[in-house]
Image (cartoon, rainbow, N blue to C red):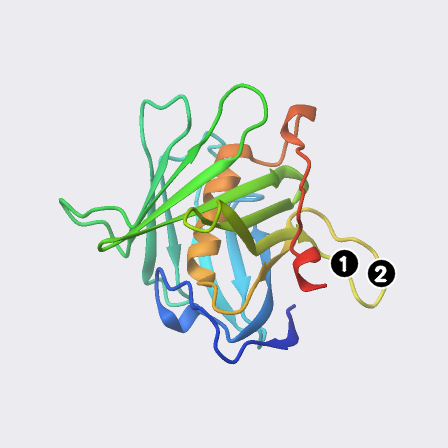
Amino acid sequence: MMTTTTTTTTNMDKFVIVDEKFCYPEETHLTARKTSVFFPGDGFIVYDPHGELLFRHDSYGPDSRPKDELVLMDPSGKCLLTLLRKKPSLHQRWEGYIGEKAEHQDPIFRVSRSSIIGRSRLVVEVHQGDANKEYQIEGCFPHRCCTIYKFYADQNTSREPVAEIKRKVDPSTGVMLGKDVFLLCLKPGVDSAFAMGLVLILDQMYGDDADDDDVEHMGHTFEDSLS
């Protein structure tokens, strides 16, 4: 269910947001699958490099309307991230909280669209103490073709691809699997719980139905950065 590359980084920069234990020392491909606990596509399960369950998200019931609160859990059901939709919001803004949200707790990150008209991308602002970081997401989630970039405002506004969502191919047959099964590809040191939290938000924002306007040029891709 999972592949892990042999590329490693000895002095890697860890992008710890949820927990350091979710940061892998090598480039890692997690397998995410939409589940059907009671109804088709009502949740997610994610497997780690050893084929063990790493994350889960349950959304019980046939209601297909967008949810305003999402919870990313570990295999035992412990809440790792609480994701809340901000309303009202033309930009579909979301906020992420570590664990179960407590009263007066500040979000660890915020997600919003940078533009409503024309070419748009998602901007992720991470707040950790006095340090603020920015990530950008481009691509088309319904097509399972997205790249997550880390943005460096102090380095001539450069950016680096740190994660990618892409379709999975069956290695035994070479056949591309359905969109309910896909890969979450992570560069060394990237917090996989944070990345999966972004996947849950993308799923609520865009679902599985893509319009032509949703498909954007990907530019510099995850694979390009490895060459």
Q: Which quarter shows the C terminus?
A: bottom right
Within 10 Å of the Cα at label 1, are there few (<14), some (14-19), or many (20+) other Cα atoms? some
| Depth order, front residue of 94/122 | 122
Tell me the distance, in whole angstroms, between the alpha carbons under discs 1 and 2.
6 Å
Q: Is residue 210 left or right of residue 36?
A: right
Q: Amino acid at mark 1?
A: Val
Instruction: Name the residue at the right extreme.
Output: 173
Q: Is residue 195 left or right of residue 212?
A: left
Please tell me which of labels 1 and 2 falls first in the chain: 1
Residue 199 in the image, given as x and y percentages of width and height: 50, 48
Q: Which residue lies under the disc numbered 2?
A: 174
Quadrant, the N terminus: bottom right
- Read off the residue under disc 1: 169
Above or below: residue 178 compared with residue 25: above
Q: Which mark is residue 42?
A: none
How far across and how far down the image is residue 29, in percent? 61, 65
Residue type highlighted by circle 2:
Gly
- Are the residues tagged 1 and 2 within 8 Å (C-beta)? yes
Residue at the spot 58% in from the left edge and 40% down from the top edge:
138
The residue lying toward the viewer, choosing from 193 and 226, is 226
Could you tell me which residue is drawn at 51 percent across and 40 percent down? 202
In the rendered image, residue 185, in percent from the top left (x then y), is placed at 60, 60
**Furthest residue toward bottom:** 10
| In the displayed structure image, the side of residue 112 where residue 226 appears, left or right | right
Question: What residue sits 69% from the left and 36% below the top?
Answer: 217
Decide: few, some or many residues near mark 2? Use Cα within 10 Å; few <14, some 14-19, many ≥20: few
Which structural element holds mark 1? Answer: loop
